[in-house]
Image (tube, coloured by chain):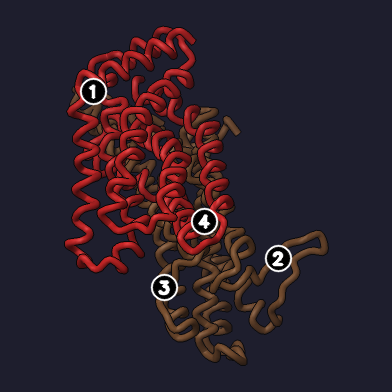
Chain colours: A brown, B red
Amino acid sequence: MHKYANPTQFMRIANAIYPWVAGLCLLLFAAAIPVALMFSPPDYQQGETVRIMYIHVSSAWLMMMIYGIIAANSAMFLIWRHPMASIAARASAPMGAVFCALALITGMLWGQPMWGTFWVWDARLTSTLILFFLYIGYIALADAFEDSERGDKAAAVLALVGSVNVPIIHFSVEWWNTLHQPSILKAGKEGVGSSVHGSILLPLFLMMGAFTMFYFALLVLRLRSELLAAKIRNARLSQIAGHSAAQPAE
Amino acid sequence: MSVFTALLSRDLKLALRQSADSLTVIAFFAIATVLFPFGVGPEAEILSRIAAGVVWVAALLAALLSLDRVFTVDFEDGTLDQLLLNGQSMTFVVLAKVIAHWLTTGVPLIIMSPILAITLQLPAEGYGTLVLALLLGTPTVSLVGALGAALVLGARRGGVLLSLLVLPLYIPVLIFGTAAVEAALTGMPSAPMLSILGGFALIAITLCPFGTAAALRQAAE
């Protein structure tokens, strides 16, 4: 793992993976969008609004997964001072915030026709809103210091503290029986089981896969531009310092 | 341990000699609460309905205002560096500061709350539970708040940032704090809600001092 603390080493792997991730993302979207939005059958109760669910569940899945990735990277950064971990965590946060907002917005759009209201103060919705605030707080805290290293560390501590919220979001629908329905996907000892018919499950899985690949592709791009920006900064600094041969830190 | 008691008594002495700091927080608590009757109207039934929630929200905001003085002064005049260099367990240092903060902010807020609840026409059955809920909830508020205060040390716009970090984490305390009073008013047992508040306090006291100590170490680097 420490081998990949070197950005060049890390990016060699990341750049090699990138075409595959991006290609798979395009492929999955090409399959998921028509199947989910046109060809899959409407639900017998919800009608066409069930299609919102494909976006909603995929966004919610990503907002949870990205927070998990941020928390894991923050732990790696604090324990081993792994420099790529903090860059990856910082690069992931805005994406997590956007997917969290998407999950909230699509949930509201679905809630209006189905529940008759845009918003209820139910445990799942409230804990998701807290997650959104945590994302915003994380981004604001990481940018709040003159010394960016201090921002990285403070934000990493916050990410770890906030991770208590993730299991709460996940189990909220089982602990409190309110308006939001329980999970439709359950991974148990017998493998992945579900209370949903295959015709709806297939587009859902396609969409979730497409969203996940989209995140990884975007993450590589963001890491790449982040490292390039650091190189430019270093080159400028050494230029100002008057070094004849600018040696950007690799 | 001697550092723990020395730090605690020093902080209490400082708070006593600069008692204006604590009084300002109490005054804010009173004014913020008193705004509500003007905002929603003086009808007793509306006020008694929202009394517990208003007292809780105002108490949280008042506590938030007091948080920046937990570490800022020590951070600026170098006391924090001395404590770190001293080789003392930072967890105990944090615990002493948090207890001092709770004694100088949490306890006055708890004492004030029934008086403010009277102005909001809280029914008689609610007072005991309100005080008990605040007694169990405010330690969590101080512990989580200290963590937030340590994280934003030296940050630009630290005060606004602090509220952004800490207020979302207060939501669970607020939910169960008001639910306890609500239960007492409707004749339901409030013990489950109070137990959950106590549980939050126990979780916070086991986890927050470590996080706060880590944040302080980074701030002083």
Q: Secondary structure at mark 1?
A: loop
Residue A132 lies in quadrant: bottom left
Spatial CA span between label 4 and label 3: 31 Å
Horizontal and vertical percent for residue B103? 36, 28
In the image, A212 versus A70, the foreground residue is: A70
Q: Which residue is mark 4?
A: A216
Q: Label 4 near label 1: C-beta < 8 Å?
A: no
Q: Which mark is residue A186?
A: 2
Q: Which residue is mark 1?
A: A244
Q: Position of residue A47 (x, y in %)?
A: 55, 91
Residue at image coords 55%, 60%: B188
Residue at x 40% of width, y 71% of height: A105
Nearer the observer: mark 2 or 4; the answer is: 2
Between the residue at mark 1 and the residue at mark 3, the CA separation in whole angstroms equals: 61 Å
Closer to the camera in the image, A214 or B114: B114
Q: Amino acid at mark 2?
A: Lys
Q: CA distance from mark 1 to mark 4?
A: 39 Å
Residue at 36% of width from left, 35% of height from top?
B106
Query: Can residue A131 be seen in the rendering of this structure?
Result: no
Q: In the rendered image of this protein, does residue A137 appear above or below residue A38?
A: above
* Residue corresponding to mark 3: A119
Q: Are the numbered discs 4 and 3 placed on the same chain, yes or no? A: yes
Q: Say if A146 sits above or below A163 in the image.
A: above
Q: Do the residues under discs 1 and 3 have CB atoms within 8 angstroms? A: no
Q: Amino acid at mark 4?
A: Phe
Count numbered badges in the picture: 4
Disc 4 chain ID: A
Q: Residue shown at 79%/64% (left/top)?
A: A191
